[in-house]
Amino acid sequence: MNQVTIVDHPLVQHKLTLLRDKSRTTKGFRQLAREIATLMCYEVTRDLSLDMVTIETPLRSMESRMLSGKKLVFAPILRAGMGLLEGMLDLVPSARVAHIGLYREPESLVAVEYYFKAPQELPDRLVIAIDPMLATGNTAVAALDRLKEHGATDIRFVCLLATQEGLANVHDHHPGVRIWTAAIDEQLSDHGYILPGLGDAGDRLYGTK
Ligand code: URA
């Protein structure tokens, strides 16, 4: 199984409960998703490597640490992944962004691509794919396929909710991709919804239902 990290930080779990609640307004849902994304970003970047650099403080020079390597890439899967992007950029404002346009075909639940635009030099960058819901895993697998076709080799995946089926699907196709999630839910409905879940993340973020 891919290494899966459940982010059990009390603030993440508290905010996730508020997010799941069906009485949450669109505004409240969007704000909470952003806040949780910032906290998830903190966890997924916890082991990034650092270089020593020399800087001048107002008083003297010193050796201090800075992130090494090229700017990292956040890769939101449209459209619900956009609901997590800004929260992650709040923490890493210089990150690049790769947009991946995929939707789930309602009958087959197969992921269909309609847009892909990524920064240069993907092979040299850590890419963090983001989608709030890892349900069947088909969309995640398709997004990871596309990122690898464009040269990405070092990829992580961040979601809010996952299912065992979705995690297993990603593992079967992309065993090297580590996953961070705030929870693993019990079940997948016949229509591909996570249960108990939080409903359709895109609709709740953008008020489209
Ligand atoms: N996508 C969603 O938005 N919600 C689910 O429950 C599953 C996939």
Image (tube, rainbow, N blue to C red):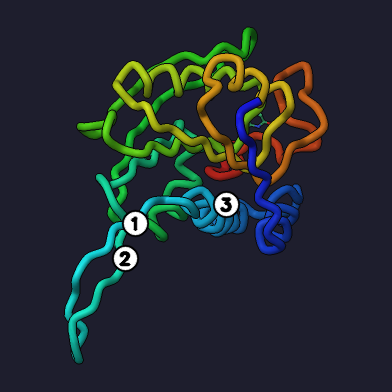
Q: Please give the residue where the numbered disc 3 appears in the rendered image.
A: 33
Above or below for 71 versus 4:
below
| 6 horizontally vs 149: left or right | right
Q: Please give the residue where the numbered disc 1 appears in the rendered image.
A: 50
Q: Secondary structure at mark 1?
A: strand
In three-dimensional space, the C-alpha distance between marks 3 and 1, rounded to whole angstroms, equals 29 Å
Where residue 192 appears, x then y in whole percent? 70, 21
**Label 3 residue near ligand 1, CB within 8 Å:** no
Is there CB contact under 8 Å for labels 2 and 1? yes
Query: Can the viewer see residue 27 in this picture?
Result: no
Where residue 88 appears, x then y in whole percent? 44, 52
Mark closest to the chain's N terminus, 2 or 3: 3
Mark closest to the chain's N terminus, 2 or 1: 1
In three-dimensional space, the C-alpha distance between marks 2 and 3, rounded to whole angstroms, equals 30 Å
10 Å crowding of disc 3: few (<14), some (14-19), many (20+):
many
Q: Secondary structure at mark 3?
A: helix
Q: Amino acid at mark 1?
A: Leu
Q: Secondary structure at mark 2?
A: strand
Q: Residue at x 58, y 55 (%)?
A: 36
157 or 49: nearer the eye? 49
Q: Identify the disc placed on residue 65.
A: 2
